[in-house]
């Protein structure tokens, strides 16, 4: 039974990485089957210290914090259960880390599956310019319109922003010209899909964060300090050729001018969140108000309680969101997760996976400043599952090419 389950997991896990970006419902089915397979193959080998990189430990600590927060939260079950359910993906990421550890074939297959899914989204986005595709959300033809495939263009741009750095990570001096040219074109097409084929501004911040981290990992901090401003200038020049994005930036300028008077615009909403959420943190700074408490307690500190329905979903900042519910301890745990993953990447030998992990962390930190990506359904799948995969791939090559052995079957 264990051998059969293990054989099935070798394909179920890549299936998850193929579908979490393209078919969220199907990916949930894959995750359920993976959890069943994990239980079927469970053995003491999964408890060995070598199978638990520090990011997995901090993910577990965050989840324990969420469980403890359920004990003292003033939020009713209908709200606290939402956060509990969403943050249960921390456990799913740990399961993936344990299953993928030492199994290089599964790792390569999973990363390739992710790439295929993203290439499908990228190709569909470009084809949307000329064809109305039945699986795409955007149903408008022509250059200068938003051509997103997923139901939420923001989530697509977050993933595509990282995919730019992913494609650049595949470039190699030892690879063929065709290989390098192909991935260079993919990187450019992914970048243009964010800057010219979407109306979202979040993707620009994420792609900037991902590329900045990519440069840091590639050329070092000192050179990156010089290269990042050049990168930003280049992105700005590219944006000047996009009528869609110029219009969005003009809107952003208007929103900034009215930031003190309009709390309901995209920027005004976030600015108001950043002003009100710290009030909650100040009330209970150490452990916060409890799991899901933000949804109800924020209504007490709003200037107009009638705006509760607008501002209660999340704080548009993952650090503040953890702070409101779990205090400075929650924020510290999240920062520890990020730093531990960066340490894994830093200690890994020079390879594409090291660049990918740094780029993913750059994207996650950037997104966490303006959204709540670990609370968002699609974004949490993307960041947590890919984080688990890349941590394992980097951990398997710390100054060595010797791969760890998989845990034994019971």
Image (cartoon, rainbow, N blue to C red):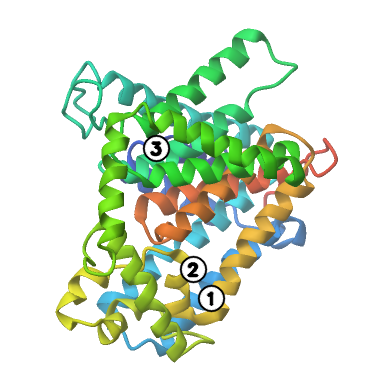
The residue sitting at 42% across, 56% down in the picture is 373
Residue placed most toward the observer, 145 or 385? 145
The residue sitting at 62% across, 44% down in the picture is 213
Q: Is residue 377 above or below residue 112?
A: below
The residue sitting at 31% across, 84% down in the picture is 297
Residue 394, image quadrant? top right
- Find residue 68 and report its horizontal and vertical position in percent: 49, 83
The mark lying in front, picked from 1 and 3, is 1
What separation in Å lies between label 2 and label 3 (alpha carbons)? 28 Å
Q: Which element carries disc 2, helix, strand or loop?
A: helix
- Find residue 397 and report its horizontal and vertical position in percent: 78, 40
What separation in Å lies between label 2 and label 1 (alpha carbons)? 8 Å
Q: Earlier in the sequence, mark 1 or mark 3?
A: 3
Q: Earlier in the sequence, mark 2 or mark 3?
A: 3
Disc number for residue 19: 3
Residue 163 in the figure: left or right of residue 342: left
Q: Is residue 296 above or below residue 156?
A: below
Residue 304 in the figure: left or right of residue 88: left
Q: Which element carries disc 1, helix, strand or loop?
A: helix
- Find residue 261 and report its horizontal and vertical position in percent: 22, 69
Asked if residue 254 can be seen in this view, the reply is: yes
Q: Which element carries disc 3, helix, strand or loop?
A: helix
Disc number for residue 319: 2
Disc number for residue 330: 1
């Amino acid at each position: 039974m264990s051998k059969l389950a293990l054989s099935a997991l070798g394909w179920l896990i890549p299936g998850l990485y193929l579908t979490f970006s393209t078919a969220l419902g199907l990916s949930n089915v894959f995750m359920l089957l993976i959890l069943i397979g994990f239980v079927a193959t469970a053995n003491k080998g999964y408890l060995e210290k070598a199978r638990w990189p520090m990011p997995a430990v901090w993910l577990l600590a965050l989840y324990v914090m969420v469980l403890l927060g359920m004990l003292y939260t003033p939020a009713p079950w209908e709200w606290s259960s939402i956060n509990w359910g969403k943050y249960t993906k921390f456990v799913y990421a740990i399961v993936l880390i344990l299953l993928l550890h030492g199994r290089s074939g599964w790792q390569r297959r999973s990363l390739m599956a992710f790439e295929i899914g993203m290439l499908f989204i990228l190709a569909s986005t470009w084809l949307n310019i000329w064809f109305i595709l039945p699986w795409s959300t955007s149903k408008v033809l022509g250059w200068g319109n938003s051509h997103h495939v997923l139901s939420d263009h923001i989530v697509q741009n977050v993933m595509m922003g990282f995919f730019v750095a992913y494609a650049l990570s595949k470039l190699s001096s030892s690879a063929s010209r065709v290989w390098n040219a192909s991935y260079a074109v993919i990187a450019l097409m992914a970048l243009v899909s964010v800057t010219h084929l979407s109306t979202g501004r979040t993707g620009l911040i994420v792609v900037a964060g991902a590329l900045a981290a990519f440069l840091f990992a590639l050329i070092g901090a000192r050179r990156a300090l010089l290269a990042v401003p050049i990168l930003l200038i280049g992105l700005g020049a590219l944006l000047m050729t996009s009528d869609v994005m110029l219009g969005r930036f003009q809107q952003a300028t208007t929103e900034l001018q009215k930031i003190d008077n309009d709390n309901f615009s995209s920027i005004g909403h976030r600015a108001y969140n950043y002003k009100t959420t710290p009030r909650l943190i100040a009330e209970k700074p150490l452990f916060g108000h409890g799991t899901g408490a933000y949804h109800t307690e924020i209504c007490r500190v709003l200037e107009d309680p009638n705006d509760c329905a607008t501002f209660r979903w999340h704080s548009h900042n993952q650090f503040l969101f953890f702070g409101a519910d779990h205090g400075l301890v929650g924020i510290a745990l999240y920062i520890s997760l990020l730093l531990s993953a960066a340490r894994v990447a830093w200690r890994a030998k020079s390879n594409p996976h090291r660049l990918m992990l740094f780029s993913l962390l750059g994207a996650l930190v950037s997104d966490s400043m303006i959204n709540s990506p670990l609370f968002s359904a699609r974004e949490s799948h993307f960041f947590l599952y890919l984080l688990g995969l890349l941590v394992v791939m980097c951990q398997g090559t710390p100054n060595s090419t010797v791969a760890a052995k998989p845990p034994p079957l019971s």
